[in-house]
Image (spheres, grey):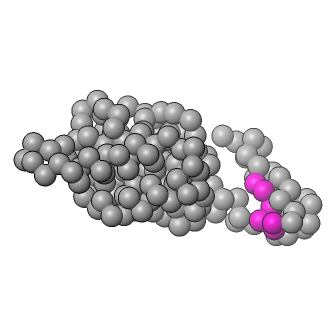
C-alpha cells in the first residue's frame, strides 16, 4: 500500500480530519503529525505478526502481539478474539474468558465470543482423559477473512471451527508488514 492510498486521521478528537500518510501537520487543525502515521499503523503490523506466530505454532508470541494491539486499541474486537483464543491455547482459560466477555460487552452481536465461551464451558464440564484440549478444539487463529479495526488482512476464526491440522497453522495470509519491524 502506498502512502498516497493510506490516510491518517488527526489524533485531536474534535478534528479527526483525514490526512495523507506523509503529511507533517493536520490539514484541519495544524496539529503536528510527524511520526503519528507510523504509530497509527503499528497495531495492524502487530496483529499480523500475531497471526504469523499463531500459524507457526507459537501461541505465546501470538498472545503477546494480540495483547499489545488490545492495549493500544481496546475497541479492536478482532484482536481481542484472537487474544482470547491464544490464551485458550496456552491453557489460560480465565484470561480467555475475560477477553471474550469484554468482546461481548463491546460488541454484543459478535459471533465468535459466544462460541469461545461455549468452548470454555465444554472444557470445564469435561474432566475425562479424552476431553478436547484447548489447542485441538478451539479453532484456528488467522484464516483469511474480513479485516478488523486494526486494518489487518486476517481475523481470528471462531472457536469450535475445525482447524485443518488441529493446530494454529491455518492457511490465511498475513500482510507482509507483519514480518517487519
Instruction: Find residue 54 and report its horizontal and vertical position in percent.
Output: 35, 47
Q: Residue at x 77, y 43 (%)?
A: 4
Give the answer, above or below, for where 103 lies relative to 109.
below
- Residue 9 painted magenta: yes
Q: Nearer the viewer, residue 88 or 3?
A: 88
- Residue 143 painted magenta: no
Instruction: Find residue 95 and report its horizontal and vertical position in percent.
Output: 36, 63
**Would residue 133 appear left or right of 67 to someone viewing this image?**
left
- Which quadrant holds residue 42? bottom right
Give the answer, above or below, for where 64 lies relative to 77.
below
- Which quadrant holds residue 65? bottom left
Magenta-tinted stretch:
8-13
**Would residue 162 appear left or right of 73 to someone viewing this image?**
left
Q: Residue at x 70, y 65 (%)?
A: 35
**Does residue 12 show up?**
yes
Q: Could you tell me how many numbered marks the image carries?
A: 0
Q: Residue at x 71, y 64 (%)?
A: 36
Q: Nearer the viewer, residue 37 or 22?
A: 37
Instruction: Find residue 99 and report its horizontal and vertical position in percent.
Output: 44, 59
Q: Residue at x 45, y 48 (%)?
A: 113
- Provide the major secondary structure of the magenta segment: loop
**Would residue 163 appear left or right of 4 to someone viewing this image?**
left
**Does residue 167 show up?**
no
Instruction: Find residue 150 and report its horizontal and vertical position in percent.
Output: 59, 50
- Which quadrant holds residue 142? top left
Q: Nearer the viewer, residue 13 or 106?
A: 106
- Quadrant of the rendering where the N terminus is positioned: top right
Q: Give the residue furthest to the front.
A: 125
Amino acid at each position: 500500500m502506498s502512502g498516497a492510498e493510506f490516510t491518517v486521521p488527526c489524533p485531536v478528537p474534535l478534528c479527526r480530519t483525514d490526512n495523507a500518510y506523509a503529511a507533517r501537520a493536520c490539514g484541519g487543525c495544524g496539529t503536528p503529525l510527524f511520526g503519528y502515521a507510523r504509530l497509527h499503523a503499528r497495531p495492524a503490523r502487530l496483529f499480523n505478526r500475531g497471526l504469523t506466530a499463531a500459524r507457526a505454532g507459537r501461541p505465546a508470541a501470538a498472545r503477546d502481539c494480540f495483547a499489545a494491539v488490545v492495549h493500544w486499541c481496546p475497541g479492536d474486537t478482532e484482536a481481542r478474539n484472537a487474544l482470547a483464543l491464544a490464551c485458550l491455547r496456552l491453557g489460560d482459560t480465565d484470561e480467555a474468558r475475560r477477553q471474550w466477555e469484554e468482546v461481548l460487552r463491546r460488541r454484543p452481536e459478535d459471533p465468535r465470543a459466544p462460541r469461545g465461551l461455549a468452548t470454555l464451558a465444554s472444557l470445564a464440564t469435561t474432566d475425562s482423559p479424552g476431553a478436547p484440549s484447548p489447542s485441538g478444539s478451539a479453532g484456528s487463529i488467522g484464516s483469511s477473512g474480513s479485516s478488523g479495526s486494526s486494518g489487518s488482512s486476517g481475523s481470528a476464526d471462531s472457536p469450535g471451527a475445525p482447524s485443518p491440522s488441529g493446530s494454529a497453522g491455518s492457511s490465511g495470509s498475513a500482510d507482509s508488514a507483519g514480518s517487519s519491524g
